[in-house]
Image: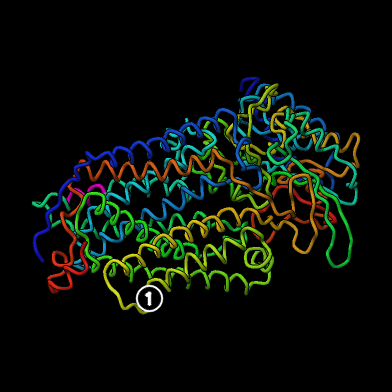
Amino acid sequence: MKRVIYSEISGNSSQFYMLVALLGAFVLSALGAAYYMEHHGHFVTGMNNQIVWGMPHVFAIFLIVAASGALNVASIGTVFGKTIYKPLGRLSGLLAIALLVGGLIVLVLDLGRPDRLIVAMTNYNFKSIFAWNIFLYVGFIGIVAAYLWLQMERRLNHFVKTAGLVAFLWRLILTTGTGSIFGFIVAREAWDSAIMAPLFIMMSFSFGLAIYILVLLAACRGSGRDIGDVVIQKMGRLLGVFVGAVLYFTTVQHLASLYATGHAGVERFILVDGGIYTLLFWVGQVFIGGLLPLVLIFRPQKTTGQSSNRSVIMASIAVILGGFAQVYVIVIGGQAYPLNLFPGMEVSSSFADGAITNYAPSLPEIGLGLGGIALAGLIVLFGIKLLRMLPTTLSNAAIDPHHNVGAASRGDS
Amino acid sequence: MSCQSKDIKMANDATRVDTAGVDKAGFDPQRRSFLGAAAAAAGITLAPGVMLYGITKSSPAKARAPGAAASSDVRWGMLIDLGSCDSGCDDCVTACATENGLGGHGRPATDAQWIRKVELKDQHTGNSKSLPVMCMHCEEPPCVDVCPTGASFKRADGIVLVDKHICIGCRYCMIACPYKARSFVHEVLEDQKPHAPRGKGTVESCTLCVHRIDSDQQPACVEACTDTGGGAMLFGDLNNPESEISKRVATYASQQIRDDLGLNPGIRYRNL
């Protein structure tokens, strides 16, 4: 493989500045939404004493899960030695940090007392999985930043493999931690399962790669760089494997829960008569996020190049939409179903005991969540403008030494 | 030997006698009441931290001395008899709201509820019951386990509280509590009670009226239930075998909600 040349994007076009302005506007409106919620209190949101984690948590958890998955592209190159992925590693690290920061900012701004962030940094209860996660998140940013630097400093390139291995192991632990935030909760029947950790790891592989594919394509096309169908098709097939694995873990999750008679109620709620949650599960998570991308990626195709790239793009968008639905079903659906304090009893009270809780996300909550995505986008934009993150070309000929010139010219645009 | 040290010795003797064998055959009641009185007098001169629980018969579960730390020699708890708890009565709920200044904003979904009346109906037999549910003051509280900053904590005497100064409002304790006992302060508060400080953006729950316990009073809900309700609630020290609550839980079968979780709540129920 030829030596890969990386360069900054010029970032002088009007489209670039318009994109920065648009993302900046979303970030500002998120700050405004956070101020509005903190000033008046959370009663202005859709959250209440039953659904205590609302839309901001859905955005935050989606972004945090995707962040660790976005790093996989770099890991495949350095840890597993797949040369075709090596030129993609820098953007992978940058995107991982950007998504994590975007998710964390949403999480912090949704706290009841975000002004006490310093308290969270100075008072630790080490029995809390939440406290562990603070270390895992901060550590992830530090380790991935070091990993990025070692990739970019050619004199230190021989340390990249070690750094990549540490980052890979760290991200596995991190996603285990995120899944365990739910899996450790013995009181919530929808969550109380050890499978949450591996399920979240597979979700991260899938969501992270889908976002990576779209960001890479947008960055290359926006900066006029060649990107061939070889790399896209390869990542598309990998995405298909991850999507299948998420479906598998989801099946096991629900089968295991269905087998326990005590969980029949919550399973019926999610799978059969839970209204919006059932709809989001079957249509959003299973069909759009699972079956559709599998068909798009693995259906027999005669054409290569642009049209098959389009399938991968469509599949990536479907995975992101379906993944968002999946996180919504887990986070909100898991809280909407009532806690079972008195098994075998019909229960009622002034505090929604025994009742399904309705939740309608408010505009400020959605605004805050979108701001997290926008912030991640801004970090990526400034990252690729200021640092040499993107290879000058990802054409088939450049990325694949065995690729014949005829196919390359057909696949590139 | 100085006068004060004599007093301490007498008090120690009294404590030892009293806790070692109160009901032993041949025990002289006059001697016991003398020693009890002597111990109470000595207590005034004792250094803070010396526990006086169980010394006098009239108040088997006394508050800690001012300035003294809470002690794990005590486990505060409650026994609620559903046989005496009427479905239409919510005197305990009203008393709690008045005592702790839980005014509410007329928004049931977001207003705080430290104690609530729950109506139960057996799905198979139709038998119905009514009971108050609040923070169970667990021996192994999940809210304390999951709190990232340590704001949720359990006092040595078993009362589970929230330190409002270090609660960041992450609400993970509300997710983890199997009893749905906690509320998040969703809006600006006015007219707070000095003894029950609250804060917008933090989580709160039943304090077992810790301020009343520390001044040797019963929790407001228990007092209201005794005065105007059905007399269903009994409060006391579960660690003191001489307390009324200990005797009752030793004599009659009692249950804990979700006892399968192994959290050993301090709130127990009869006839559940």
Inspect this view and state whether residue A78 appears.
Answer: no
Q: Position of residue B66 (x, y in %)?
A: 65, 24
> Does residue A388 appear left or right of residue B48 in this picture?
left
Name the residue beneath numbered marker 1: A298
* Between B261 and A23, the one nearer to me in the picture: A23
Disc 1 crowd, CA 10 A, few/some/many (<14, 14-19, 20+): some
Q: Position of residue A413 (x, y in %)?
A: 21, 61
Relative to A134, residue A82 above or below: below
Under mark 1, the amino acid is Phe
Q: Residue at x 66, y 40 (%)?
A: B183
Q: Position of residue A191 (x, y in %)?
A: 57, 60
> Does residue A251 appear left or right of residue A118 in this picture?
right
Q: Residue at x 74, y 48 (%)?
A: A352
Relative to A77, residue B23 above or below: above
Q: Residue at x 9, y 63 (%)?
A: A2
The region drawn magenta spans A145-150
Name the main secondary structure of what is drawn in magenta: helix
Q: Is residue A146 magenta?
A: yes
Query: Could you say which quadrant of the image residue B185 lies in?
Result: top right
Q: Is residue A348 magenta?
A: no
